[in-house]
Amino acid sequence: MFQIKKRTKNNSDFQKLTKALDQDLSITDGDEHEFYNQFNGLEDLAVVLIAYRDNQAIGCGAFKKYDEFTAEIKRMYVLPEEQGKGVASALLKELEKLASSLAYKTCILETGIRQPDAIALYKKNGYDITANYGPYMGVKNSLCFKKEL
């Protein structure tokens, strides 16, 4: 079993997990990594969650304010050996609950078309593909999702 705990963007476990995420994305995104990476800063994150199993950080997720009614899901990551065990879905559901409690009506997110596991996760959790928003408009390798809370 695992637990989900609210932390801050400065938490060392969160820092380690996002570093691992960035290493994975640098491989997946290839030449486009620098472009995408500029939108993955930690400074604007409003809520950070970390999943723990036996006091070891195994996954994370966060959101930031996109606009008055919309939270943008960011930095979703689960260690490879923990994937497929419901950790990402649990993190996502908890992020949605917290966003709703802060009066957000919608969650949005972006992932890459080269990330089939992420795409499957979001579809499984009720996210619908939507028009690319903000910095992802016109970016052919970006896939944006939206979910009404």
Image (cartoon, helix red, strand yellow):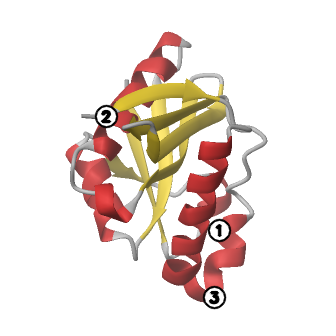
| Image quarter hosting the C terminus | top left
Q: Closer to the N terminus: mark 2 or mark 3?
A: 2
Secondary structure type for disc 2:
loop
Amino acid under disc 2 = Phe
What residue did someone put label 1 on?
Answer: 36
> Residue pushed farthest bottom?
31
In this rendering, is residue 71 above or below 144? above
Residue at 74% across, 52% down: 41
Numbered marks: total: 3
Q: Contact, CB < 8 Å: mark 1 with mark 3?
A: no
Q: Nearer the viewer, residue 3 or 105?
A: 3
Instruction: Pinpoint residue 24: horizontal percent, then vertical percent.
Output: 51, 73
Provide the secondary structure element on which disc 1 rests.
Answer: helix
Q: Along the line of sight, which residue is nearer the eye, 126 or 1?
A: 1
Q: Which residue is drawn at the image coordinates 49% and 37% (left, top)?
A: 50
For the residue marked with disc 1, what is the amino acid?
A: Tyr
Residue 9 in the image, given as x and y percentages of width and height: 69, 37
Foreground label between 1 and 2: 2
Please tell me which of labels 1 and 2 falls first in the chain. Answer: 2
Mark 1 and mark 3: span between their CA atoms?
Answer: 10 Å
Badge number at residue 2: 2
Taking 140 as reference, is 129 left or right?
A: left
- The image's mark for residue 31 is 3
Q: Residue at x 38, y 70 (%)?
A: 115
| Marks 2, 3: nearer the viewer | 2
CA distance separating discs 1 and 2: 30 Å
The N terminus - image quarter: top left
Q: Amino acid at mark 3?
A: Asp
Q: Would residue 33 be seen by someone viewing this image from the given angle? A: yes
The residue carrying pointer 1 sits among few (fewer than 14), some (14 to 19) or many (20 or more) residues within 10 Å by Cα, namely: some
